[in-house]
Image (cartoon, rainbow, N blue to C red):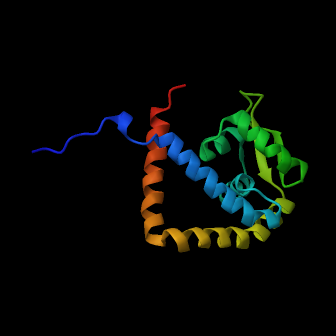
């Protein structure tokens, strides 16, 4: 006899479950990164910029981080105010609204100071959840992100 398929409505909501987990993890990482003067989101932005050569277009950064452009711009305001990033008109001659975001030397120093805090948060998660379990979940979440990006209906 074939196993019965559960109806989608019988499963916990994927979006709600992931949001709760995300907010909980963000609080943990924020508690660690706070001593370096950064939030999890700010650290992620700065690390992404550094991994991509220190500068990228606002739209590419938004795509990489799965942000709406306007939400990302709002998240960049405090980083810009602190002198950790610069935002300039982009090189795109077709779209005059295009902006480039670059990490500043001060931003690089702040990120370097925050790395040990991030490592402590990462270690706390891995020690409790398990490194192997996290590896499997991270892979599954990457697949889920890709699936959701392909299904994005705007």
> Where residue 102 sits: x, y (%)?
78, 51
**Hey, which residue is sitting farthest front in the picture?**
10
Q: Nearer the viewer, residue 34 or 102?
A: 34
> Where residue 74 sits: x, y (%)?
78, 39
> Where residue 120 sits: x, y (%)?
67, 73
* The N terminus sits in image quarter: top left
Can you say whether 92 is above or below 114 in the image?
above
**Hey, which residue is sitting farthest left in the picture?**
1
* The C terminus sits in image quarter: top right
Evaluate whether residue 146 shows in this view.
yes
Q: Is residue 136 left or right of residue 33?
A: left
Q: Is residue 78 left or right of residue 65?
A: right
Residue at x 77% of width, y 29% of height: 97
> Where residue 118 sits: x, y (%)?
68, 67
Q: Is residue 63 left or right of residue 112?
A: left
Residue at x 60% of width, y 46% of height: 64
How many labels sit on residues? Answer: 0
Q: Nearer the viewer, residue 9 or 120?
A: 9
Q: Nearer the viewer, residue 54 or 14?
A: 14
Can you say whether 28 is above or below 152 in the image?
below
Residue at x 66% of width, y 55% of height: 26
Residue at x 42% of width, y 54% of height: 140
Can you say whether 25 is above or below 97 in the image?
below
Using the rendered view, name the quadrant where residue 87 is placed. top right
Evaluate whether residue 52 shows in this view.
no
Can you say whether 122 is above or below 3 in the image?
below
């Amino acid at each position: 006899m074939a196993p019965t398929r559960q109806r989608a409505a019988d499963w916990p909501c994927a979006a709600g479950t992931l949001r709760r987990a995300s907010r909980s993890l963000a609080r943990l990482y924020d508690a660690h990164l706070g001593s370096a003067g950064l939030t999890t989101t700010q650290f992620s932005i700065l690390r992404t910029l550094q991994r991509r050569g220190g500068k990228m277009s606002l739209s590419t950064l938004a795509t990489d981080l799965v942000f709406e452009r306007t939400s990302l711009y709002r998240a960049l305001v405090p980083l810009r105010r602190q002198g950790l990033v610069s935002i300039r008109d982009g090189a795109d001659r077709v779209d005059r609204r295009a902006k480039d975001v670059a990490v500043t030397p001060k931003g690089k120093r702040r990120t370097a100071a925050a790395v040990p805090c991030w490592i402590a948060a990462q270690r706390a998660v891995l020690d409790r959840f398990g490194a192997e379990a996290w590896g499997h979940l991270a892979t599954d979440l990457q697949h889920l992100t890709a699936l959701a990006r392909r299904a994005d209906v705007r």
